[in-house]
Amino acid sequence: MAAAKRDARVALLRAVNLPGRNRIGADELRSLAASVGLRDARTLLQTGNLVFRGGGTGEALEAALERAAALRLGLQTDCFVRTAAQLREVVARNPFPEAARHDPAHLVVSFLKETPTPAAVAALRAAIPGRETVSAVGRHLYAVYPDGIGRSHLTAALMDRKLETRGTARNWNTVLKLADLAGA
């Protein structure tokens, strides 16, 4: 199994399986992965999480998955690919270990296309009207939602606008499950 996980990667699709739009089933997602040459594809939950082997480099693979989703499924979405080693780093570099231990469902990691500048992160912090706390580490933004996520004004749209890059978020429990599946 260790050899099988050596080249494991994770692809996260943005904004899929939302109420009434961007529906994609697990079988369709695995088929999409196979169509771009990915092997041993597995899904986690119904939120666009894919663990697989093979497939080349991050940006090229992201573009291939995005094109395939558009052509095969009519789905316009962003894909974010990370290796098992990168996921291991995401877990290790978590700046909010207390939230991870005590309230992991309200700790969220946004996987970003680009590394935000310090000025962009400062602009995001200044725009947060609630008690949410954020910290950027490379191409990842960690956010703690102490009052819950559903009613928070720290939204994906606000993050995209202030950070000047796109992202997709997963709560800490899902990040840990993905890391485990990828052998991170």
Image (cartoon, rainbow, N blue to C red):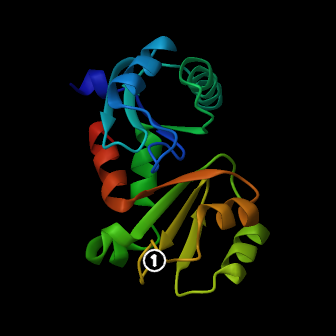
Q: Position of residue 143 (x, y in %)?
A: 50, 70
Q: Position of residue 84 (x, y in %)?
A: 40, 38
The part of the image, by quadrant, that contains residue 25 is top left
Task: Give the mark count.
Answer: 1
Position of residue 181 relative to residue 69, above or below, is below
Q: Is residue 38 left or right of residue 6?
A: right
Q: Nearer the viewer, residue 14 or 95?
A: 14
Q: Is residue 102 left or right of residue 30?
A: left
| Quadrant of the image containing the N terminus | top left
Residue 117 appears anywhere in the view: no
The part of the image, by quadrant, that contains residue 98 is bottom left
Position of residue 61 relative to residue 136, above or below, is above
Q: Is residue 92 left or right of residue 4?
A: right
Position of residue 17 relative to residue 171, above or below, is above
Residue 14 appears anywhere in the view: yes
Q: Residue at x 56, y 25 (%)?
A: 69
Q: Nearer the viewer, residue 63 or 53?
A: 63
Residue at far front of view = 20
Q: Position of residue 184 (x, y in %)?
A: 33, 42
Amino acid bearing label 1:
Tyr
Q: Residue at x 43, y 14 (%)?
A: 34
Q: Residue at x 43, y 74 (%)?
A: 96
Q: Residue at x 40, y 23 (%)?
A: 28
Residue at far left of view = 1
Q: Is residue 56 left or right of residue 116?
A: left
Q: Which residue is mark 1?
A: 145
